[in-house]
Image (cartoon, grey):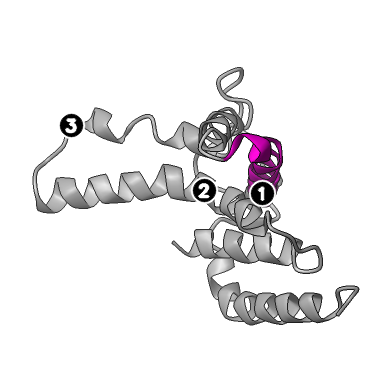
Amino acid sequence: MPDALTHLCGGLLARAGWRGPMVPVFVAGAMLPDVLSRLPIAALLFFSRHVHALPDFAFDGWMPLHLPAGIVLWSLLLTMFSPEGMRRPVLGNLLAGATLHVALDLCQRHVGLGYPLLLPFSGRDLEMGIFGSEATIPWLPVLVPMTALAWWAGGRLRPGR
């Protein structure tokens, strides 16, 4: 899942200079749209090919978890598992990380279907088309060390250090 790794780096880069206890929640929010929508499909495809064939409808229904309406729903659900006094910051950080995810995805250019951002209210595709959806893969060898360096430098530059 190279795209999830790209979103991990994006989340860490966004919070490199602004630390705190909610960084893991923010980074989870940046990664979960891909994890919750694409990982189940990959697992079901593997099962269907190697164990027992599954009907087509088993693969439907996962992609809305990658869109804003689904993101809001799973963010609210996950927030309910946090302590009552922490729910507002958890929800805010999950949604902020997921917003970063959506913003990065909107920069992509897809072959075929684009990004139906306003689903279920509109099925119209939206995307800026700045780079192809696969373009992040060759950049990972640069992005990963850059993220590590920014994270290290951001921690060293914090006030009170």
What's the amino acid at mark 1?
Gly
Tag 3 secondary structure: loop
Of the numbered discs 3 and 2, the one sitting upstream in the chain is 2
Q: Which residue is mark 2?
A: 32
Q: Residue at x 33, y 45 (%)?
A: 40
Name the kind of residue labelled 3 in the image: Pro
Q: Residue furthest top?
A: 121
The magenta region covers 83-104
Is residue 126 visible from the viewing direction of this image?
no
Picture residue at 48% right of the left edge, 65% below the top: 2
Residue at mark 1: 97
Real-space CA distance between mark 1 and mark 3, rounded to the nearest whole angstrom: 34 Å
Front tag of 3 and 2: 2
Residue 133 spot, x, y in % from top left? 55, 56
Q: Main secondary structure of the magenta part?
A: helix
Q: Quadrant of the N terminus?
A: bottom left
Work out whether residue 82 can be spotted: yes
Q: Establish if 79 lies above or below 141.
A: above
Front residue (pair 19, 41): 19
The answer to whether 86 appears left or right of 46 in the picture is right
